[in-house]
Image: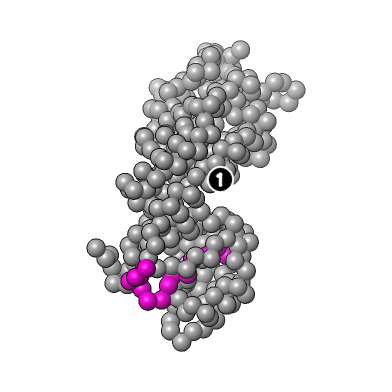
Amino acid sequence: MSHPASLDGRAILEPTLPVAAVARRLGIAPATLRTWDRRYGIGPSGHTTGRHRRYAPADVARLELMQRALLRGATPAEAAEYALRVSPAPAVDGVLAPEPVVLDGAGPDPEAAGVRTVRAGGRVLRLPGKCPWARGLGRAALAMDATSAQQLLADLIAAKGAETAWTEVIRPVLAAVACRWEQSGEYVEVEHLVYECVLAAVIGATPLVTAPRNPRPVLLCCVPDERHSLPLYVLRAALAGRGIGTQMLGAALPADALASAVRRTAPLAVALWAHLPRYAWATVFDELPRTRQPIRLFACGPGWFATALPDRVEHLDDLPGAVDRIEALLGGRHE
C-alpha cells in the first residue's frame, strides 16, 4: 500500500509499512511502537481513526533517529524530542526526502550511521561507534559467555585503564542492552551478566594501595537508596592505579552511616554517586559532620544534573574527569 502525496497537483505514491514490519525493521516489539506513539507522538503521520496504522518513510526515519538517540544513552522522552526536532533533509522543489525504506525489512545499512549490529545466540544488539572491544563484549554477553566476557574485560582494562574502558566500551554496551530491554522487555539476563562480569573484572584489576599518596582516604559511596554502584568501582580502580587510597562503602549508604564514616575516617574527600535524579537530594551534604580538617565534597554521576548543589559541593559529571579532579587535590598526576 502507498501513501498519496501531491506536488503541483500530481499524486506521488510513497511506500508505507504496517506496524509489524516497522517493528521487525527496528528490532523492537509492536507494543513499543504504540507506546512511543501514545506517549511521545512518534507515530504514523497519516494515521486516521478507524484505519490501520501505516508508517511513511519520514515516519520510519524519525523512529530510527529516536532509536539512535536511545543507543547513545538518552531517555525515551529525550530521544523522542530529538527525533521530532530533527527533520529529514529537503529534496528538490521543497519536497522532503526521507531515508529510503526497503519493504523487505532490510532497511538502510545501520553501519552508515555509525551503528554496528552484533549478533550471537540468536539475539541482536546495536552498538554506536566502531570499537572492536565493544563488539566483542556485546557478542560475549549475547551468547551468555561469562568467561570470554571477563577475559576481554581484563585485557581491555589492562590495555586502556579502567576509566577509558568504562567510557569507550562498558557504558555503551550497558546502554545498548538497556535500550533493548526498554524496547522489548527482554535481555534482562544479558544486562545482569554484563554487570557481574564488569564488577568482577574491575575488582580484579584494582591494585591494593599499601602506601597511598594521600594520608587521608577518599570516601566513595552511593547516596541513600541509590543502588547503581558499578561506576564507583571503576572510579576506585582508576584512583588505585594512580596510587590514591580510597574507602569504598558501596551502594545505598544511609545518611547516618555516611556521617559516622566521615567522623571516623576524616577523609580527604567524599564522592557521592547518584545515577538517578530521584535519589540526588542535596540535603545529604548538609547532614555531613564538620571535621577539624577540611573535606572536599563531590557530587558524582548523571543524577545530580538537575539538583541545586551547595556552594561547597563540586559536580563531577564523568569518570575520567572525576579521576583527574580528585588527583588534582594531591598536586597532579603522579608518575
Q: Secondary structure at mark 1?
A: loop
Quadrant containing the C terminus in the rendered view: bottom left
- The answer to whether 177 appears left or right of 161 in the picture is right
- Give yes or no for residue 216 being in the magenta stretch: yes
Range of magenta residues = 210-223
Q: Position of residue 121 (x, y in %)?
A: 53, 26
Tell whether 63 sits left or right of 325. Answer: right
Q: Residue beneath label 1, please?
A: 75
Q: Quadrant of residue 114?
A: top left
| Residue at 37% across, 76% down | 215
**Residue that sits furthest to the left in the current view:** 335
Q: Is residue 116 above or below residue 274?
A: above
Q: Position of residue 310 (x, y in %)?
A: 51, 74
The reply to whether the magenta stretch includes residue 109 is: no
Q: Nearer the viewer, residue 85 or 26?
A: 26
Q: Residue at x 34, y 59 (%)?
A: 241
Residue 156 visible in the current orientation: yes
Q: Is residue 314 above or below residue 181?
A: below
Q: Decide whether the magenta segment is chiefly helix, strand or loop.
A: loop
